[in-house]
Amino acid sequence: MTRLLRFAALAIAVLAVAGCASTPGRPDDPFEASNRVMYAINEPLDKYIARPIAQAYVDYMPTVIQIAARNYFNNIDDLFSVVNDFLQWKLDKAGNDMARVMINTGFGFAGLIDIASDLNIPRGMEDFGQTFGYWGIPQGPYLFVPLWGPTTVRDGTGWILRYWWSPTNEIPNVPVRNVIYGFGALDARASLLGASSLLDQASIDPYTFVRRSYLQRRHYEVHDGNPPKLKDEDE
């Protein structure tokens, strides 16, 4: 997982540099030529490696372990959501997320059990990319990173910060830490198996479908579900 994140950060930087010399295209995807190359590289890696492993994880890993792994990483996401709630001055969300972290960490075995959801405490689900957008930082060019997926310069920077400051990095036992990150990667890919089926059935260009879906979803999240209309040339 550590190598994957380092690769993702390097790929973002390489794409950004390479794109500077590319022919300008869409304003939100000026590096489309290099992004399509990365997308083409990703397709066989995902189809023949990542997706089958994720499907095997869903089919054969005990459900209780899958739920525990998902809850563990959701609890860390809630912790970062507290930080981003305060950075965006969303105090109601901050209170809910702080309560979730305290309850699940203290009484849910470090977040392995999601007691807070059983108590109907909602998740804020704020991240650094959304905070950057809240403070007016442009999303920057769209990027596609093999084995990572779609992102933007703004969101990619946020994810690197999220990883760098993760409490999991403080686990001194490296093999245990890597196993935990491995479960996180498997769970993340497994959660997208349904989206993979939808993408396979898409009648339009899959690259365009992924780009549009990602950018629209992030635009929606940054504006808390009430976004201004996007200027989409393909609309």
Image (cartoon, helix red, strand yellow):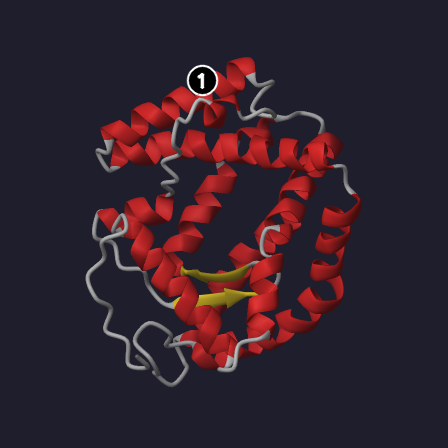
Query: Which residue appears farthest toward the top when viewing the image?
Result: 106
Which residue does the image show at 30% across and 31% down from the upper left? 93
Residue 109: quadrant of the picture: top right
Query: Identity of the amino acid at label 1?
Result: Met
**Quick one: SS at disc 1?**
helix
216 to 176, vertically: above or below: below
The x and y percentages for residue 230 are 24, 68
Q: Which residue is mark 1?
A: 102
Q: Residue drawn at (70%, 32%), measured in percent from left and top? A: 64
- Residue drawn at x 60%, y 65% is 196
Frontmost residue, 52 versus 117: 117
On the question of residue 18 being in view, the answer is: no
Which residue is at a point 75% across and 33% down the rendered structure image? 175
Up/down of 182 relative to 146, above or below = above
Q: Nearer the viewer, residue 17 or 110?
A: 110
Provide residue 76's location: percent of width, then percent of height. Answer: 50, 31
